[in-house]
Image (cartoon, helix red, strand yellow):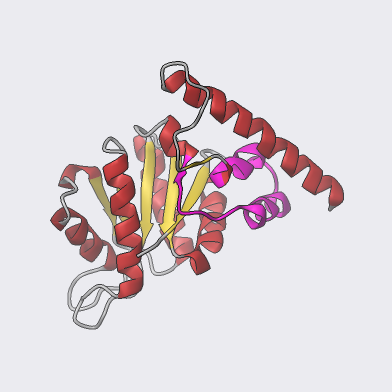
Amino acid sequence: MRDLNRRLAAGAAAVALGLGAGAGTASAGSTDMPSGTALVNGATMLGCQFGGQEVLQACTEMELLTTDDPALLTVNPFTTDIVILGAGLYPDGGIRPVLEERLRTGLRLANDFPFARVVVTGGVPQNGRTEAQAMSEWLRGAGVPPHRISEENQSNSTVQNAQFSNRLFYDRGTTGAVIVTNDFHLKRAMLNFRQAVDGRIPVAGVVARG
């Protein structure tokens, strides 16, 4: 385990340096990431995304959860998708506070990165609409253009959120995913998505806040 931790730390440090250099190229020669950008958010996974399940789980457990913008979006907002995870609706189809927190954070990211695509994921309909449909309506009402939003309406669990979203990633050439959910849910969600993409693309996370 000590050797594993050393390898993970070394990988994260190397990727942090690489992301910093990439961000400098993207921002007219500056080697500094913008204020509020989290290099560590997803950097661990970038350093060992091709490892086995033990390494994958260790990477995710080491993740530093934050509300900051992840470097994935800062470096490449064009093919990095913002993925907002659903939560159970009220029986009348209304949005519960825990889901509204996720939506508000997803909206902030969507506004900060206006070229990034947004995926809303969640089935389990109430009063004739799924979580994803309710989330899409909320985002459109908040000003996000409909063409930026993709709905995944079939999933019944976080594992299925990841599996079904991965099909969308694959079909449209997504190069990175940023998962938005609450702090008590984020590490499990990131692990599920990292398992679903199987090392093909990096996955980062952002803690939802009200």
Q: Nearer the viewer, residue 167 or 114?
A: 114
Q: Quadrant of residue 36?
A: top left
Which x, y percent locates residue 196?
52, 51
Residue at the top extreme of this rendering: 29
Q: Nearer the viewer, residue 56 or 8?
A: 8
Q: Main secondary structure of the magenta part?
A: helix
Taking the image as shown, residue 178 lies to the left or right of residue 147, namely right
Q: Is residue 174 above or below residue 28?
A: below
Q: Residue at x 67, y 31 (%)?
A: 14
- What residue is shown at x 55% (from left), y 39% (from top)? 39
10 versus 149 height, above or below: above
The residue furthest right is 2
Does 8 appear in magenta?
no
Where's residue 208, x and y in %? 41, 60
User: Which residue sits at x=55%, y=50%?
Assistant: 194
| In the rendered image, the vertical position of residue 151 relative to residue 7, given as above or below | below
Q: Quadrant of the C terminus?
A: bottom left
**Relative to 6, 80 lies left or right:** left
Name the spot of residue 103 as percent of width and height, x first. Answer: 30, 60
Q: Which residues are magenta?
A: 41-70
Please state the horizontal and vertical placement of residue 76, each as a whole percent of the image. Answer: 41, 31
Residue 134 is left or right of residue 112, and the answer is left
* Total numbered circles: 0
The answer to whether residue 9 is seen in the rendering is yes
Res 121 visible: no
Residue 57 forms part of the magenta stretch: yes
Q: Residue at x 26, y 80 (%)?
A: 90
Q: Residue furthest bottom?
A: 91
